[in-house]
Image: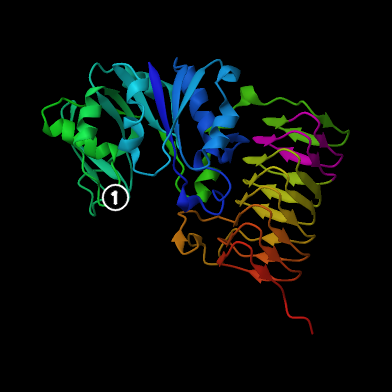
Amino acid sequence: MKAVILAAGEGNRMRPLTQARPKVMLPVANKPIIEHLIDTLISAGIRDFIIVTGYQAEQVEWHFGDGSQWGADIQYCRQDEPLGTADAIFRVKSMVEEHFLVLNGDTLYRPQDISGLLAISTPAMGVIQVADARNMGVVTTRDNWVSSIVEKVVPPPTNIANAGIYLFNREIFSAITSLEKSPRGEYEIPGAIQALIDSGTSFGWYELSDWLTFSDPWDLLNGGDWVYEPSAMEILGTIEQGAVIKDNVGVGKGTVIRSGSYICGPVIIGNNCDIGPNCFVRASTSIGDSCHIGASVEIKNSIIMAGTRVPHLTYIGDSVIGEGCNFGSGTQIANLRFDNMNVKAAGIDSGRRKLGAVIGDRVSTGINVSIDAGTVIGSDARIGPGVFVRGAIEPGSRIFRNQQ
């Protein structure tokens, strides 16, 4: 059985984080989303993959190569023009056999659910019950069969969401051939499935126990037990006397945890980092390769990407920080509103009571910069000393206080 992974999209809602990388390559616990997915598929017994790439395709192809590092066989198919998910799978027509699995590359699934779907003898799809289906494609069912798929209708007819995982046979290609573009101007998998159902094909469904989707930047903070695996936590760096490591903590090669540092897992720290002295790294934090986290810095439930420097006297909570950033002394990121309402980011309700900032690559702050909860800062921005910022800051912005 081959698995076709759809990884061509940019992920506009993830900007500024996707300006320099495809959505599926965003790191969660120091591994790209799509790598977590491939690890899960391998644990479910699948080792043959076709990855459909598009935006920043080279990054995916360079990272995985032929898949031998994972004990897998990986092939690639380019979708240079974003014509939709059905177009993406039509491009692999000559590369698959009678039955094949298709998955969204930006969603994680449980191994037992993948196995459960594969056990169905007919074409089928994964579904999951959700509390709010207004922005999702939903499925109506009759007994063991899908009767219809409805895309983002308000109010939705059911709370059974399309989970973006499908078991197809080659009939799907005939349905795609006659498919018309959706209102979004794309050829989409749900439309092809509906065409099959309308032609009399029996299409099954399997209810997933769980899933983890990544639509907005703050979704990257939801990894929890999906990505912080105790079995993957190794101490490969140097822990100085006087440093405290509690619970599940992984430390990469060449990394030094200096005296007085207190790290409470689950936390994963990459290679060649300099951590401390006297810093506090709290649970559900990942720190990429070649980062510096200095004295009197506290980081909680955040993603710090590779090459970022947080030298001293800084608080970062519930935030996603891009690569190569540099924080001046005393930079503080708020993560809570006074009224305890959900934090909005760029005008969007995050659904989170606590959310700090989403910061693109190569952003620099001067000393004593204050960043309000829900602030989104574009890549290559420069924030001068003593400035308070909030809302959405455009890439490349220069924000400084007037000199008296």
Q: Residue furthest bottom?
A: 404
| Amino acid type at image mark 1 | Gly
- Magenta segment's dominant SS is loop
Q: Point out the image quarter for the N terminus.
A: top left
| Residue highlighted by disc 1 | 185
Residue closer to the observer: 154 or 166: 166
Q: Is residue 59 visible?
A: yes
Residue interval drawn in magenta: 252-277
The residue at the point 72 percent across, 48 percent down is: 308
Q: Is residue 261 magenta?
A: yes
Q: Quadrant of residue 291?
A: top right
The residue at the point 67 percent across, 35 percent down is: 268
The residue at the point 22 percent across, 34 percent down is: 177
Residue closer to the observer: 331 or 177: 177
Task: Give how far across and how far down residue 340 sits, in percent.
Answer: 52, 62
Residue closer to the observer: 400 or 294: 400
The residue at the point 41 percent across, 37 percent down is: 79
Residue closer to the observer: 361 or 44: 361
